[in-house]
Image (cartoon, rainbow, N blue to C red):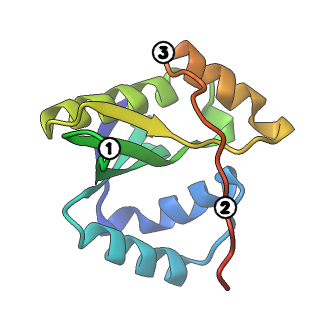
Amino acid sequence: MEIRKATVSDVSELTSLMEHLGYPTTLDKMKARFDNIESKSDYNTLVASYNGNIVGMIGLVKGYYYEIDGSYVRIVALVVNSNYRSKGIGKSLVQEAEKWAREIGASGIGLNSGNRPERIKAHEFYKSMGYIEKSIGFAKSLI
């Protein structure tokens, strides 16, 4: 397995991975999203390849605290192809995310995960990686 920075040549695989995450999209839409994300220096997208196939990704963004000094990283997307789960790929992606966060001087890392029955295994995974339940999230659509 190899973890590396995503490139535009990975967009087809990223499109497929979004479906595994529960967010089907088109190649053109994913390319536009990726181009926008990759043009911002506070974002980082990593992919995992297994036997030569892109089978996982993690999307990260650096943010700045209002309430204390310093910065943090948010995991805004994490997915492993359902055919490749339980092989340590997600763990490796999270470890690389934590490594990047440390390299850029972040003092913390966090994520939000949906409160739905199909996310229970994901929540167990995050807890096994040392993440704790800390807050309740709220969202509102503006469109």
State the image quarter where residue 3 is shown.
top left
Q: CA distance from mark 1 to mark 2?
A: 21 Å
> Which mark sits nearer the N-terminus, 2 or 3?
3
Q: Are marks 2 and 3 in contact (CB under 8 Å)?
A: no
The C terminus, quarter of image: bottom right
Q: CA distance from mark 2 to mark 3?
A: 25 Å
Q: Amino acid at mark 3?
A: Gly
Q: Mark 2 — residue?
A: 139
- Given this view, does label 1 or label 2 mark the residue nearer the observer? 1
Q: Mark 1 — residue?
A: 67
Numbered disc total:
3
Q: Mark 3 — residue?
A: 130
Residue at x-position 51% and y-position 84%: 28
Q: Amino acid at mark 1?
A: Glu
Give the secondary structure at mark 2. loop
Residue at x-position 64% and y-position 42%: 113
> Which mark sits nearer the N-terminus, 1 or 3?
1
Judge whether 68 appears above or below 125 on screen.
Answer: below
Q: Position of residue 33 (x, y in %)?
A: 44, 75
**Left or right: where does residue 27 sit relative to residue 96?**
right
Residue at x-position 50% and y-position 74%: 30
Q: Nearer the viewer, residue 134 or 75?
A: 134
